[in-house]
Amino acid sequence: MTFYNHYKELDQKEIVKMLYANYDKNYLLKLLDKDVLHLHHFLALLSPSAETILNDMAIKAQLLTKKFFGNTMLLYIPLYLSNECSNNCLYCGFNKNSKINRKTLNSREIEREMQFIKNKGFEHVLLLTGEFPSIAGIEYIEKAIVIAKKYFASVSLEVFPSTQDKYQTLVDAGATSLTIYQETYNQETYKNVHLSGPKSNFEFRINAPEEALAAGFRKVGLGALLGLSDWRLDSAFVAVHAKYLLKTFWKSDISISFPRLRNTPSALPFIYNVSDKNLVQMILAFRLFLPSSSLLLSTREPAELRDNLMGLCITQMSAESKTNPGGYTSDDSSKQFEIDDTRSLKMILSSLNKKGLDPILKDWSYHFNGF
Amino acid sequence: MFAMKTQDILTIAGKEFSSRLFTGTGKYSSPKMMVQALKASKSEMVTVALRRVDLNNPKDHILNHLDRNRFHLLPNTSGAANAEEAIRLAKLAKASGLSNWIKLEVTPESRYLLPDGEETLKAAIALVKEGFIVLPYIQADPILAKKLEEAGTATVMPLASPIGSNKGIKNIEMLKIIIEQSNIPVVIDAGLGRPSDASLAMELGADAVLVNTAIATASNAKEMGEAFMLATIAGRKAYLAGLSDSSDIAKASSPLDFLS
């Protein structure tokens, strides 16, 4: 049974009911004493009622994070390989109909970008593409991984959905994790914002994380693009997806990201507002539900909020990000989105130190995959 | 005043240790804090995750701060999901000149980081044959402990409870059997959350304990390092002194002497 089948069998009305039920404060506080939370507990912690216990949730979440991750923060940097895309997604800067400067890095340009960010001290790189397989498909990504392995201890991917056999070639090339955001688990909304292109196939995308794990990726990253739909409901489905994957692939590691649309892209009629308080509640609830999972917060978010969330329960952050291919060493292509926290790695290291956190730049070795 | 009796030396693979508290290098808020805590703990055996360090970088974030004259560095294979990966990492450590000692950790899942006995045994057999000094991290499984001893490992390192859980000794009966049967040093590793847990492990007759999370994530890591040092010594002294409810005492006092 695929996750899509599992998803179709879920009683969505019941989930919504539990997300918006009125919970007694004492009941909610007692949940914080539990070692293991079930889905219905997680839904209660996401509910509007739980806004009254955010501080208590934060204390427990911080303790759990400290236990599993210590006083540390893993830092990584994204590297966009291509902004070519065949999808029409209303929220995305790479939308195929947008008149933007398209670029797909060649091997020489990839090397140049990698040398640049390696020199800054990064050891964990995240390679990203749009979805345009004839220009930047599996073989292209495979070549980029091989180059990246020369420079970095860890190579992660955020690319398009594919099948186990194709993902297998990326694992064999040396990539260790794959992030695929479903964007929204609301199938109706999904249809309305993904108008054409392969990404409009909701089912193919939602099954991609299990294809990736079956192919041998150690870690899969999940998330919803916050703002497209009700964040509470999308968070519930992200959690269900994570649990499904953990149960189906016992060796798997799941990380959760919290990408938030902060300005309404012009093509979208409106976005569902996700306040800082909402974002924090969501992150805390995920930490309590998935104590050992990496929780990521990117440079989409402002410096001040990122600083406040350091040491609370975020365990992984990007730094100095550029969202256009070749953006570290040139400026002739268009960005996917504007980042907010534009601080240098050095400044982020200093913020981490002030918070009593040890920045980790290397937490992997390519030797795991063979010499 | 808290020094061990000079004759109470722990010997592993021919190397002598006067401290029975082994420590780690992960989860500290800074390398500076790590060094302060390790010094305060008087630990002489310090484990380092190979995945974390850059063996080619003389200014490595962790290695650069550890005085090799004070600390015996014990590289570990944290992150290895199977025997093959663990063996590769061990060889990497040896080839780089870091050490031919290896704390063998094979943890195929990331939620509880529980050791895979089958793969650990496989890796241990291969590494011992290649001349490594192998210290395997295992479940408190007495049969596996004996198989590893037969394979030639230098110690066995059974867990007290899941790593990082700070839950203390949750499998005491199995640990007692391992300690009773072992002809090689038994190091209780993982889950020791409080100094009293370390004391209890030593009172049971463990040869040493390994503590990381509880020290590294304490509000004052340095003080906690010292607290664990004292607790380890206290537990060891109590064991050597003969706890009044242990069978050793009953034997020594020979209540039936009058019969002979």
Image (cartoon, coloured by chain):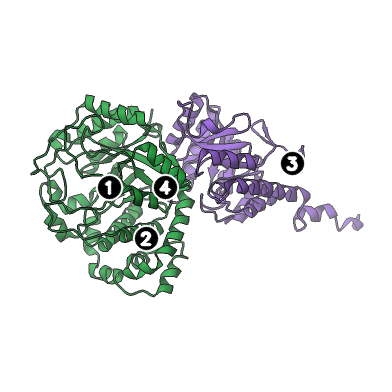
Chain colours: A green, B purple
Residue designated by label 1: A300
Residue count near mark 4 (Cα–Cα under 10 Å), binned few <14, some 14–19, many ≥20: many
Residues at discs 3 and 1 both on one chain: no
Residue B3 - label: 3
Seen in the picture, residue A255 relative to A38 is either above or below; the reply is above
Whole-number angstrom distance, CA of label 4 to CA of label 1:
31 Å
Residue B55, horizontal then vertical, whole percent: 47, 28
Residue designated by label 2: A285
Residue A319, horizontal then vertical, whole percent: 33, 40
Q: Secondary structure at mark 1?
A: loop
Numbered circles on residues, count: 4
What amino acid is labelled 3 in the image?
A: Ala
The quadrant of the picture occupied by the C terminus of chain B is: bottom right
What amino acid is labelled 4 in the image?
A: Glu
Label 4 resides on the chain identified as: B
Residues at discs 3 and 2 both on one chain: no
* Of marks 3 and 1, the one in the foreground: 1
Q: Secondary structure at mark 4?
A: loop
What amino acid is labelled 1 in the image?
A: Arg
B166 lies left or right of A108: right
* Of marks 2 and 4, the one in the foreground: 2
Upstream in sequence: badge 4 or badge 3: 3
Residue B109 - label: 4
Residue count near mark 3 (Cα–Cα under 10 Å), binned few <14, some 14–19, many ≥20: few
Q: Quadrant of residue A272?
A: bottom left
Mark yes or no: residue A5 visible: yes
Residue B11, horizontal then vertical, whole percent: 68, 35
